[in-house]
Every structure is written in C-alpha cells, then in structure tokens.
Amino acid sequence: MIEPKTGAVRFRDGATITRELTLATFDGSPLAKRSARDEDSDDTYVTIRLAPREMDGEVFGAQILFHDEVLNTVNLWIMDETAIVDGVIAYPPEKGWDTWTLKTAVAAKARHDAWLLRVLGPPTKVDAKHYITSYELPWGSAWSSYDPRGGGSEIGLRYAARDALTTKRGKRSKR
C-alpha cells in the first residue's frame, strides 16, 4: 500500500520504499535483489527496475529513480501474469506489442485510478484530456497517467525535496 501521510510504499513481503531511501541504503536492502540498474554517464541519475512485488492483492512492477543518490520518483504499474517470466519483468510482455490495444491500455489506467482512489482517496485533479489523475499530498505528489505516445499506463510518486517540505502556513516541516 501507499501510506497517504508519508508516501511510504509497503509491499506484502515487508519490503518498503520510503522518501528517506538513498541509493546506498537501497544497495544493501532486499529490494536490490533481482533488480536491474541503469545509470547515466555522470552518475547523476540512477534508474532501477525492481523484481515484481505483491501489494494489496495485486502484483506490481516498480521502477525507482534516484537523483544525486536521493530517491526522487517511484513508478508502479499493476501487472498481469504474462508480464512476469521466472520472477522477472519481461518488457514488453511475452504477448508482445502485437496484442496491445488502446482499450486495454486505457483499462489499465482505469485500474490504476481505482487502486489509487481506494488507497489515497479522491484525487486533487483529474485531467481527462491528457489522461492524468493527480494527488497533492504532504510528502509530494502522486498520479496515474496514460502515455498515448508510449502506449503505457503507470502510477507515479514524486517526493518533495526534504528541505522543501512545508506546512500550508509556510513553516518548515519537522520531518
């Protein structure tokens, strides 16, 4: 689940992603097992695709992005069983892009929207024209989106910079 107050992502197996996660902490955690890493040439950004994990009765694919070794973004997507081969995410799924349809892609976004509504409550904004449902939360933002150019849907979490977290009155948070 995603904890609405903190943005922590808690998987069924106990693995947890929190906004305090650093790249060094990640490397020593159970999350690092069977993950795939993609670093840019100057090591400023590191993207890691995690092994599939269960959460709230669904199997999720997950990708996390670190910027300057600090967690910045978590992308999640509800998977179907054809996307997992030997416990690893097959991308694109074994069925291949030949079976992709706009109907199934939009249905995946609707499934993400319904899951977020159940976990986080009503969204802050729905932009139907651009296929984005968004939430502004105390720890950052969350969204569900469909990318018509890429053909995929995902749930995203972006954590506010730790020194930028403020209350509505503009005072610095004690986090």
Image (tube, grey):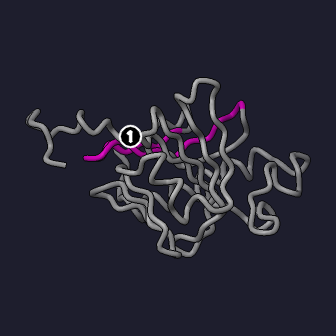
Single out the residue that lies furthest toward the right: 98
Side of 80 relative to 100 (left or right): left
Which of these two is toward me, 22 or 144?
Answer: 22
Which of these two is toward me, 142 or 49?
Answer: 49
Q: Residue 127: percent from the left, percent from the top?
A: 47, 36
Q: Residue 171: percent from the left, percent from the top?
A: 9, 36
Q: Magenta span has 135?
A: yes
Magenta residues span 132-149
Which residue type carries mark 1?
Lys
Q: Quadrant of residue 34?
A: bottom right
Q: Residue 128: percent from the left, percent from the top?
A: 52, 37
Which of these two is toward me, 149 or 160?
Answer: 160
Side of 123 relative to 55 (left or right): left
Seen at 69% across and 50% down, the residue is: 36
Q: Main secondary structure of the magenta part?
A: strand
Q: How many marks?
A: 1
In this rendering, the answer to whether 75 lies above or below 30 is: above
Q: Residue 61: percent from the left, percent from the top?
A: 64, 57
Seen at 55% across and 66% down, the residue is: 30
Seen at 32% across and 58% down, the residue is: 4
Q: Which residue is mark 1?
A: 125
Classify mark 1: residues with Cα within 10 Å, few (<14), some (14-19) or many (20+): few
Side of 102 relative to 28 (left or right): right
Which quarter of the rendering shows the N terminus? bottom left
Q: Magenta span has 39?
A: no
In this rendering, the answer to whether 81 lies above or below 101 is: below
Seen at 33% across and 38% down, the residue is: 160
SS state under label 1: strand
Side of 163 relative to 32 (left or right): left
